[in-house]
Amino acid sequence: MRPITSITVHCSDTETGTVEAIRKYHVETKGWRDIGYHFVIYRDGSLHTGRPMYMSGAHCPETNMSGIGICVIGRTAFEKKQLEMLEFVIKDLQSRFSIKEVRGHCDYPSAKRQKKSCPSPQIETFLKEKGLWK
């Protein structure tokens, strides 16, 4: 297993979405070998596996090699069930891999250059209130 030291939180910037739809976009449009995220949280709060965790991600150049990418389906407003699942997954990964760093995609230079704002102020505020945004 590769070293895992961080979690990067993303949003899909779409109102709907599935692992299959994101995978198709990442493979067919971007030319990647698989979906870039390790996990995707649907609008109903269900958790879905994307890229296997043993593989480096394709979601944030600064954290791909040693990070886990989590994508929450939505743009700016997210369901309570999604936020609860995000909290659960982050805590689980932190306990399994001793992860200290949890940040949004927007916090990294590559996203700032692209003017990305994901995952959204709602998610950032929620995770800060839970003490998980570090």
Image (tube, rainbow, N blue to C red):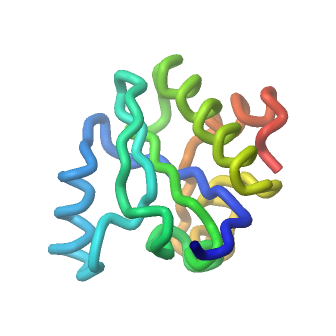
98 or 105, which lies in front? 98
Q: What residue is shown at x 74% (from left), y 44% (from top)?
A: 95
* Residue 105 in the image: above or below residue 56: above
Q: What residue is shown at x 57% (from left), y 60% (from top)?
A: 68
> Is 26 on the left-hand or right-hand side of 58?
left
46 or 31, which lies in front? 46
Please provide percent x and percent y for residue 128: 79, 35
> Is 26 on the left-hand or right-hand side of 97?
left
Please provide percent x and percent y for residue 93: 65, 47
42 or 74, which lies in front? 42
Please provide percent x and percent y for residue 91: 70, 38
> Is 13 on the left-hand or right-hand side of 77?
left
* Residue 10 in the image: above or below residue 62: above
Please provide percent x and percent y for residue 14: 32, 43
Q: Check the picture and name the quadrant holding the N terminus.
A: bottom right
**Whether residue 57 can be seen here:** yes
* Residue 77 in the image: above or below residue 75: above
Q: What residue is shown at x 65% (from left), y 53% (from top)?
A: 104
